Amino acid sequence: MSLIVAYNSHYGSTQQYAEEFARRHGVVAEPLSDVTPGEIMVVFSPNYAGTCEGVKWLQHQDLSGAKVALAVVGMTLTEEVRTKDPMADALGEKATQVTRFYLPGRLAYSSLTRVHKAAMWGLHKMLQAKKHRSPNEEAMLQDYNTDVDRVDFSELDAIDQWLEG
């Protein structure tokens, strides 16, 4: 049984995680669009504006008998996203077949497209007007219009342990 490491990435941090994980296991990370499901598979995908391409891809695959993990990269505070586990709902019936991990990402305002900057501006204005904000929303306000890099390869250790189990 060989390990498949697949990813999709918008600005690069998800690809970096996938490539580091693949390196650790002596395989090559492949773009999600280029792979077919295998017996053991880890899919790295960003949570981008509430959507995750990895979830969409997994929903259309036959995962019967496969060992599958979804590693979601994003800017939501890790404690919050791990507690809420939003991709379980997004996966629907497939959630029981997919082990989910949440990894801290990078948001480089200096690299965002105009459309994405406009979306972040709108979100920022909405959060400013909100009276009772969560710790995650406070972090979003604090980090607005700055480059924030929370990528941490030690977060891959949990996926390594899952793979060995």
Image (cartoon, rainbow, N blue to C red):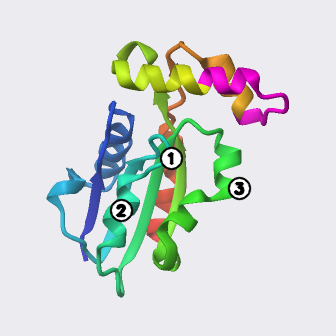
In percent of width and height, residue 67 lies at 39, 76
- Res 1 quadrant in image: bottom left
Q: Secondary structure at mark 2?
A: helix
Q: Crowding at label 1, few (<14), some or many (≥20) Cα neighbours within 10 Å?
A: few
Question: Mark 2 near mark 1, Cβ–Cβ under 8 Å?
Answer: no
Per the model, the C-alpha gap separating discs 3 and 1 is 16 Å
Which numbered mark, 3 or 2, is in the foreground of this view?
Answer: 2
Q: Nearer the viewer, residue 125 or 32?
A: 125
Q: Secondary structure at mark 3?
A: helix
* Residue depicted at 62% across the width and 19% down the height: 143
What amino acid type should be assigned to the residue bearing mark 2? Lys
Q: Which mark is residue 83?
A: 3
**148 left or right of 29 in image:** right
Q: Residue furthest left?
A: 34
Question: Mark 3 near mark 1, Cβ–Cβ under 8 Å?
Answer: no
Question: Mark 3 near mark 2, Cβ–Cβ under 8 Å?
Answer: no
For disc 1, the marked residue is 50
What amino acid type should be assigned to the residue bearing mark 1? Gly
Q: Is residue 133 magenta?
A: yes
Per the model, the C-alpha gap separating discs 3 and 2 is 22 Å
For disc 2, the marked residue is 56
* Residue depicted at 64% across the width and 20% down the height: 125
Q: Nearer the viewer, residue 5 or 80?
A: 80
Q: Crowding at label 3, few (<14), some or many (≥20) Cα neighbours within 10 Å?
A: few
* Residue depicted at 30% across the width and 73% down the height: 60
* Residue depicted at 46% across the width and 77% down the height: 94
Q: Which mark is residue 76?
A: none
In percent of width and height, residue 5 lies at 29, 57
